[in-house]
């Protein structure tokens, strides 16, 4: 493959990653805005009774409200993860599955990072809007869903020996 063909292929992968990141980020921010405009904090709306509810919460911590007093730490971690993902996408990723899952991870991380940076109570310490509630589990949001799904795909890619450059181990 010639250098221009490789460069075009890399740009295509980067565009795919950017596309899924924009989709994840947009869906996350749209759902959060809709919840804020149409629900009262703490309100629950049954969607599928006994299985799925919208439950509007503000979360200063991580999953399961862990670390509620260390919101700024999550802001730093999310910023670092976003930066690492961008570097990997620009410099190392040459595989569509890796590009798509890292794009999903980036979009999800940026969705929650936006909340941390720009929502009350303060810059870098903002509370994340959560609204998806299923029985016996944490209340979460669209960004969290993209993050978890992306990390599941990362695990599958690593366990099956698929490298960032598209080659396979062994």
Image (cartoon, grey):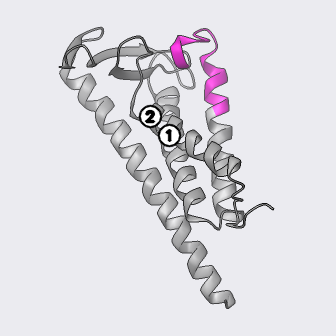
Magenta segment: does it hold 32? Answer: no
Q: Report the residue marked by disc 1.
A: 149
Q: The C terminus lies in which quarter of the figure?
A: bottom right
How far is disc 1 from disc 2 in space, using C-alphas?
Answer: 6 Å
Position of 157 compared to 115: left or right? Answer: right
- What number is the disc on residue 115? none
Mark 2 Cα shell of 10 Å, populated few (<14), some (14-19), many (≥20): some
What secondary structure is the magenta-colored segment mainly?
Answer: helix
Relative vertical location of residue 136 with respect to residue 89 in this rendering, above or below: above
Magenta region: 63-77
Quarter of the figure with residue 135: top left
Q: Position of residue 143 (x, y in %)?
A: 44, 35
Q: Secondary structure at mark 2?
A: helix
What residue sits 44% from the left and 19% below the top?
Answer: 120
Please tell me how many numbered marks the rendered image carries. 2
What residue sits 65% from the left and 40% below the top?
Answer: 81
What residue sits 49% from the left and 66% below the top?
Answer: 15
Question: Along the line of sight, which residue is nearer the eye, 154 or 66?
Answer: 154
Q: The N terminus lies in which quarter of the figure?
A: bottom right
Q: Position of residue 93 (x, y in %)?
A: 66, 63
Question: Along the line of sight, which residue is nearer the eye, 96 or 15?
Answer: 96
Check contact, mark 1 vs mark 2: CB within 8 A: yes
Q: Report the residue marked by disc 2.
A: 145
Magenta segment: does it hold 67? Answer: yes
Outermost residue toward the bottom?
2
């Amino acid at each position: 493959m010639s250098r221009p063909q490789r460069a075009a292929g890399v740009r295509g992968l980067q565009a795919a990653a950017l596309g899924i990141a924009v989709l994840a980020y947009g869906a996350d921010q749209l759902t959060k805005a809709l919840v804020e405009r149409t629900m009262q904090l703490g309100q629950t709306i049954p969607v599928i009774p006994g299985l799925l509810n919208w439950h509007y919460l503000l979360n200063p911590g991580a999953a399961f409200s862990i670390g509620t007093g260390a919101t700024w730490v999550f802001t730093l971690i999310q910023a670092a993860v976003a930066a690492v993902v961008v570097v990997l996408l620009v410099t190392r990723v040459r595989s569509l599955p890796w590009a798509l899952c890292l794009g999903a991870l980036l979009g999800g991380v940026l969705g929650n990072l936006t909340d941390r940076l720009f929502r009350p109570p303060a810059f870098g310490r903002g509370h994340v809007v959560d609204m998806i509630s299923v029985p016996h589990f944490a209340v979460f949001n669209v960004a969290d869903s993209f993050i978890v799904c992306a990390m599941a795909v990362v695990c599958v890619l690593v366990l099956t020996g698929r490298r960032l450059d598209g080659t396979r181990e062994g």
